[in-house]
Amino acid sequence: MARAPYEEFEHTADLGLRARGGTWEELLANAGSGMIDLMLDPHSVRARDERTVEAEADDAEGLLVAWLGEILFALDAERFAPAAVEVDAADEGRVQGRLRGEALDESRHQVRNVIKAVTWHDLKVAKTDDGYEVTVIFDV
């Protein structure tokens, strides 16, 4: 039986996410999907519109934090409710992708958790036999 591409775990007053991917691009997409799933019910969002998302950093951990931060910014500051995330191109210093979703409508979209920030606490990106795995904690 295949393992899920991401899973939530308990972490004191914060939220934790463990994401996996066979490639670096797949890991970034799965981490983004996992964070979206923590923030709101993606099934309540129609993928009508598209937003380009890009991030850069000096290393894998920094890129992951910047990437997830851009997805959080889309929801929090731009009021864009993402239903899905796609990674078009990535290496360990840059990622470019797209969010599919629509304008946030709190009367229709089920907000699950208000994430304040992507943290560096216990952040780990690891190469595994199956690809990559990351553990990330969100401040709520």
Image (cartoon, rainbow, N blue to C red):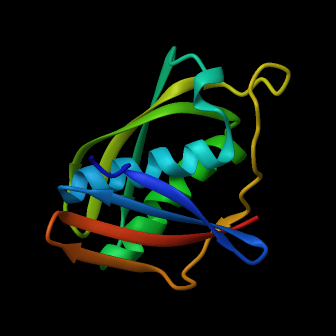
- Residue shown at 61%/51% (left/top)? 72
Instruction: Please identify the residue farthest to the bottom as the structure is shown.
Output: 122
The image shows residue 56 at horizontal and vertical percentages of 35, 65
The image shows residue 4 at horizontal and vertical percentages of 38, 49
Task: Classify residue 67 as left or right of residue 14.
Answer: left
The image shows residue 11 at horizontal and vertical percentages of 67, 75
Give the image quarter of residue 101.
top right
- Residue shown at 32%/68% (left/top)? 133
Give the image quarter of residue 58.
bottom left
- Residue shown at 16%/63% (left/top)? 130
Task: Classify residue 136 as left or right of residue 97.
Answer: right
Q: In this view, does 64 lie above or below 51?
A: below
Q: Is residue 76 above or below residue 80?
A: below
Q: Between residue 64 and residue 94, name the one nearer to us.
A: 64
Instruction: Please identify the residue farthest to the front as the structure is shown.
Output: 1
Q: Between residue 27 and residue 10, name the one nearer to us.
A: 10
- Residue shown at 18%/56% (left/top)? 23
Q: In this view, does 78 lie above or below 95?
A: above
The quarter in which the C terminus is drawn is bottom right
The image shows residue 128 at horizontal and vertical percentages of 20, 73
Marks counted in the figure total 0
Instruction: Please identify the residue farthest to the left as the structure is shown.
Output: 129
**Taking the image as drawn, is residue 77 in sight?**
no
